[in-house]
Amino acid sequence: MQLLRAILQRLLTTAITLIGVAVIVFVVVRVVPGNPIAMMLPPGATDEDIARLTAQYGLDKTIPEQFLIWARGVLHGDFGTSITARQPVLDLVLGRLPATLELSLMALVIAVILGGIAALTGTRKRDTLTEAGIDITNGMALSIPDFLWGLLLILAFGVLVPIFHISGRVTPSLELPFTTDFYLVESLVRLRFDLWLDIVSHMFLPALALAIPLAAIIGQLLKQSLKETMHLDYVTLARTKGYGENHVILREALPNAILPTLTLVGVQFTFLIGGTVIIERLFSYEGLGNMAIDAVINRDLPLIQGIVILFAVIFTAVNLVVDLLYAVLNPRLRHG
Amino acid sequence: MADARALVHRRAGLRLWLSAGWIALVAAAALLAPWIAPHDPLAQDLFLGRLPPFWMEGTEPGYWLGTDSLGRDVLSRILHGARIALIVAVIAGTLTCLIGATLGLLAGFLRGWVDLVISRLIDIWMAFPPVLFSILLIAVLGPGLTSIIIAIVVIDWTRFARVVRAEAMAQGAMDYVASARVAGRTRIGTMLREILPNVLPTIVVLLTLEMGIAVIVEAILSFVNLSISTDDPTWGGMIAEGRTSVHQAWWVLVFPLVTLFLTVLAFSQLGEGLKDRYDPVLQ
Amino acid sequence: MSFLQVTNLSARIKGSDHRLLRGVSLTVEAGEVRGLVGESGAGKSMIGKAILGILPRAIEITGGSILLNGTELLTLSPAERRRLIGASTALIPQDPLTALNPSRRIGPQITDRLVDILGWSRSAADARATELLDEVQITDPTRVLRAYPHELSGGMRQRILIASAFAAEPKLIIADEPTTALDVTVQKQILKLIATMQARHGTALLFVTHDLGVVAKVCQKISVLYGGLVVEDTTAEAYFTGPAHAYSRALLAATPKYTNPEASLLPIPDAVIAAVQADVDAYDRRVP
Amino acid sequence: MTDLLRITGLHLSLPDLNRKPLIGAAPRIHILKGVDFAIAKGEIVGIVGGSGSGKSTLARTLVRLLEPSAGTIHFDGQDISHLSEAALRPLRRRFQMIFQDPMSSLNPRHTVAQIIEGPLALHDVANPSDRMREALDAVGLGQRFATRHPHQMSGGQRQRVGIARAIALRPDFIVADEIVSGLDVSSQAQVLSLLERLVADLGLTLAFISHDLSVIRRLCNRIIVLDKGVIVENAPSAEVFDTPKAAATRELLASILLPEVGADWQT
């Protein structure tokens, strides 16, 4: 009963959030100076041509009217037509989404591995120079945003020691047999490890740039949480039963220390996804973010709207998943 | 324990002085750029294009850190770029802090409908990808320094609001707040005299962090060509240009990047250093 | 020979001259209950932790010996020591709310030592757990063994911790303020339970507490501590009829006692504190 | 003797936010269920009860940190049960509270001087720093403590700052909520004898809330026993101990562990 109410409450606030996002982006986009229709027509188009196209895209109506028309479309799965590409926004956006999802998830995996190692090592070697070293590294990784890490990685592993690709999603000359846009997954499924390696080599640096700040946050929060847990009586009790340090950290402390970290990591993961916008640009990676920047530069209103809404949906979905995970992992919520 | 504490203190002291020192250096560069820069940052000379820095072969005297593809002096451009970086950091950082911290404090302490409205706003804001949002705002507002500052404030106030709200809520549950009520303090008085001093250390840390972030946002916007007019030298603009020619002239990317890196790092460490040094609870 | 013999045990905070234990000596005979009494900072919990090898990392033992059934603990390797401690001693901790792992079921938390450290079969360990819960008067053992800690009350959890402590029939149990965190009305029941179990199993018990009322009920011997120094080592009988040391007397007079309100809750006179502090200083001069 | 404080038919319920429905008000938990008593000027009344008896909620209601759901609180003849915060403010000087946990009830970022002078300034007391110094002396802390922060003191010292803050206003009535439960026996004895002396010297009226009957026996003239939100016993101290009427009182008495060998163990 309590759980059901919590879920309903979440869905309600999520709906409010999404409507809020839609309204704001709709209004902001419509005060962009410059007429997108005029930009897409060849020079020498008549005022009549412009008026006709403007009406075709519904841009001659008032903003509330436009919003209602658009909202009705969205409810039917119609996000409008891109002005520059002249294709349905939904198709364009869904075509790019897999690239961004793969990049974000790869970054998440890297962050969890790096952060987890840092936290566990720091806890194992607490109050030593090793821990101090981890703290300093974490502190630096944390205070430098993904954009700067991306640039530094380009210099280090793209130019100085060129072992990774720094541009694109896959080497353009390669023949791609893919039927979906999930290149990373599909290359594995098709056992095309040559392609997989090429894709990973393209994705690794942007994913690492996104992962470093999150890894630092995970490392810091999880270590702090672990260290606090290590002082609790049930950990002490386990020691007196004859268990050693590794067992105590992994079986007694870790399952409980993960919970408080998890909620914060959820929010931070949405920041990471937001970071793909500029990182994709930096690495010329063909994902949603890169498309979004082009859309803004080209004043492609329907496309901008579609992308921003999609991001908002992803963010709220991530938060929902994190809450569910929390409930699953927490015996307090699972039982009783 | 005494020993560990002394160690932490020494490290904190060192951190404070190093970060404050670097920021002072950047500030000096910003103030004195017209006098200390060896060249006009905008002067192009195609015959002097892509000169390497001074320790390499084929340099020209006076161009210490080399030149970019248009023959503009990298060092002079970095010095001049410090101006915009610092203006954005200080003004945008402070404004964001004032607005965000105030809203967070009100929401966290007063609770009720104030909290409801502000929390909902935060939720909506957090559902936007910030970089995309800022690019969009600049597209709306048009390029320029004021636009950048407005965009940063509009987007980043939630950073302060979220943290300060949570902190104020935690402090509000403490008995010293109840005690202030028993003593007859008003709600606003309690918020300002009792809660604020306890939230202030967090605010200071966030403020300096935000100053670093503001510099980065400016750089990102320059990078996508939406910042200031393209003439004015900015670190982000230099980085954008350096990125395109990174294989031919790495120094055009490296020097502004290192400067930006150190500045952002210094800002983030400054707050922590100040807190360690001046927070009475940590003494 | 005593089952537990602590001799001249000294400890301090690493890298400082802040001493926590100043040459503590005490013995616990097999099947005997000794109370360790003192105010916060007197070092009473530190002794228990030193025996069990769970001192915080910042604290180091600077001298002395701990003989457990004739084996010197302080010279054993960490792994050997853990095994010995796990097999022959147990701890009843202070706070039942934090002493059970919230993400594990009760059953495995009682049986893990038997299975992992002592090599029992799982079925034997499970049977033992049911038997123990019965012994600590938990009526519904099967349900409780499958429950998570948050589903049980504080008093219930403390019973489980007591059961868990007796699981491997240890020769020595260290109880660290086991009733302090409980509601007043359950304290007495839990204390009785510990006393009954101790008597039935013939376990030696080192009982750390600040509460003289508790000591009076369960202990046969008492060590009174101040500043890491044992100021009095006596029998409970002797202590409560007339402690020899002025500080012990003052501590007793400061304790509330409703049957004689005028003679209780008396602040410890400054002169008494000064005298006992002088003993501490004298120790520090004697032992550099 | 005149009553300084008179409580009639006091009910108090708080919203249970854990069970709040999606729309509408949360269900309420009934904590105090019709409490009547009076405290005369100069009296020291002990309020005792186990956990969940509602004694801390009662303490907070007496100083109007909580507003009663029903019933009245008369302070010195004036009905304060539903006065607004602004209307209460001038009266606040006259009734003060000392809290259980001084670490939480003293602002960690204020100095002792600021903590004690703050309330004085609010009530326009002349020479607040003189009064602060007087109060520090009265609780046996020297002037050197004025510049310290709470984390630089021991538990007993912090609790004495809490007492100093309350008495500096020279109130008529003080509620002390479990003020010694976190302290060592020696600090406990010290704080209590200090409180006893101050109450006598300043002619204070005191409501002393505790779970420990032994402590209350020493300090209070009269004892009120609270159980599940109702008063089950209200009598002079000696009577409560000699002839306890309510089962809750007997249970509390039976749970006391006297510092003497044998005697009460087997009850």
Image (cartoon, rainbow, N blue to C red):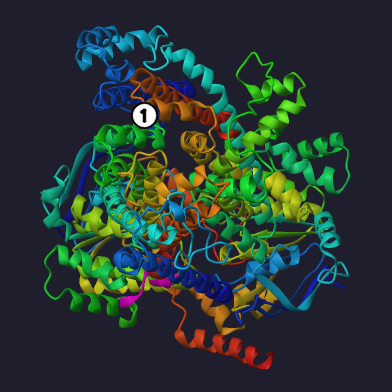
User: For residue D220, what is the image quadrant?
Assistant: bottom left
Q: Quadrant of the N terminus of chain D?
A: bottom left
- Which stretch did the figure color magenta? D146-157
Q: Nearer the viewer, residue D191 or B251?
A: B251
Across and down, in percent, residue D49 comes to 41, 49
User: Would you say A293 lies left or right of A255 here?
Assistant: left
Across and down, in percent, residue B81 comes to 36, 56
Identified at 44% across, 48% down, the residue is D50
- For label 1, the crowd category at 10 Å Cα-Cα, with few meaning under 14, some 14 to 19 and many 20 or more, is some
B251 w.r.t. D110: above or below: above
A173 w.r.t. A106: above or below: above
Across and down, in percent, residue C222 comes to 67, 72
A272 w.r.t. D133: above or below: above
Q: Nearer the viewer, residue A10 or C66?
A: A10
User: For residue A308, what is the image quadrant?
Assistant: top left
Q: Would residue D147 be counted in the magenta stretch? A: yes
Q: Identify residue for label 1.
A: A297
Q: Is residue C56 visible?
A: no
User: Would you say A270 lies left or right of B132 here?
Assistant: right
User: Would you say C41 lies left or right of D12 here?
Assistant: right
Q: Give the chain letter at badge 1.
A: A
A166 w.r.t. A67: above or below: below
Instruction: Tell me how many marks there are.
Output: 1
Name which residue type carries label 1: Ile
Identified at 12% across, 69% down, the residue is D125
Q: Would residue B240 be counted in the magenta stretch? A: no
Identified at 56% across, 84% down, the residue is C246
User: Would you say C287 lies left or right of D127 here?
Assistant: right
Q: Is residue A315 visible?
A: yes
